[in-house]
Every structure is written in C-alpha cells, then in structure tokens.
Image (cartoon, rainbow, N blue to C red):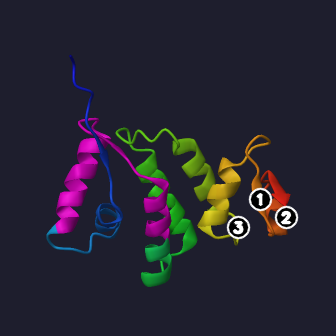
Amino acid sequence: MQQSEKVYLIDTNVVLRYLLGDHKRFSPKAASFMQDLAQGLKKAEIPPIVVVECIYVMEKFYEIPKSEIVDKLSRILNTKGIVNPDKSEILNALMKYGNSSFDIVDCFLASKSSPQYPIVSFDKDFKKLKAFYEEL
C-alpha cells in the first residue's frame, strides 16, 4: 500500500516569522520552509483560522496596512506548494477584506455563502459584501 504524500498544516507563527523576518532563529527556518513550498518540494495548507489570526496580529499588533496584509497573504496562498482545497474562498475573502471596511470574519462568511448555504445574521451589511444571507 502506497503512503499518501505528507501535507503540512502551517501555524500562524511560521507565516508571521516568514512575512516579518523579525526573529533571528525562526525567520530563516520559516523562509527555508516557504522556499521548499515554492519549489514544490513540500505541500502545505494554511487553515482559514490561521489566516484570520495572521491578519489580526499584523493589523492590531504590527499596524501593517490592510493592502499590504492582503498582498502578503495572497502571495503566500498562491505559492506552488499551498494545496488548500478552500484556496479560492480564502483569496476571495482577502479581496473583500482589502476592498472594504469589513472585518475578515464577515468577509470569510460572505465568500463561503451561496443560495444553498446562506448566512444567518442580524447584520444587514452583508448586502454590501454581496453575500447570500437571511436576516433573523
């Protein structure tokens, strides 16, 4: 029986150390791992919750502009070795986040919504995100 290929789950601290290059020991290790992904030597997923946490930390703690956050995370998600099955939803959420005043969670919900999978909310602002939703 053939073993399936290993797919790594990337944690927030790896993404941040790579993007920020701010840690003498960890940043080079993160950069090396990301280089392996870019070359297709390894495969990995970045769970949506990690994307949310990265945004929160970069926005609130490091005060990085929203457009720069979107650019950096989009580049990583478009790396050859990133194999998220939900990659298009995450990228769509990042675009909505970058082009609006909405928080990333609302943008994720809007990106995932469909006529068969509507958001239920009290928030009428989902209309502005062109989301499928039903108001309670």
Point 27% across, 69% down: residue: 21
Image position of 82 (left or right of 37): right
Task: Tell me how far mark 3 sits from mark 2, CA to CA.
Answer: 24 Å
Q: Nearer the viewer, mark 3 or mark 2?
A: 2
On whether residue 41 falls in the magenta region, the answer is yes
The residue that mark 1 highlights is 120
- Label located before the other in sequence (3 or 2): 3
Q: Which residues are magenta?
A: 26-55
Residue 115 % position (x, y): 80, 42
Point 68% across, 63% down: residue: 99
- Report the amino acid beneath label 2: Leu
Q: Is residue 59 above or below residue 87?
A: below
Q: Secondary structure at mark 3?
A: loop
- Label located before the other in sequence (3 or 1): 3
Please name whichever residue, 55 or 21, is drawn nearer the observer in this view of the structure: 55
Point 75% across, 44% down: residue: 114
The residue that mark 2 highlights is 136
Image position of 34 (left or right of 84): left
The residue that mark 3 highlights is 100
Q: On the rendered image, what quadrant is the C terminus found in?
A: bottom right
Q: Secondary structure at mark 2?
A: loop
Task: Tell me how far mark 2 sits from mark 1, CA to CA.
Answer: 7 Å
- Mark 2 touching mark 1, by CB under 8 A? yes
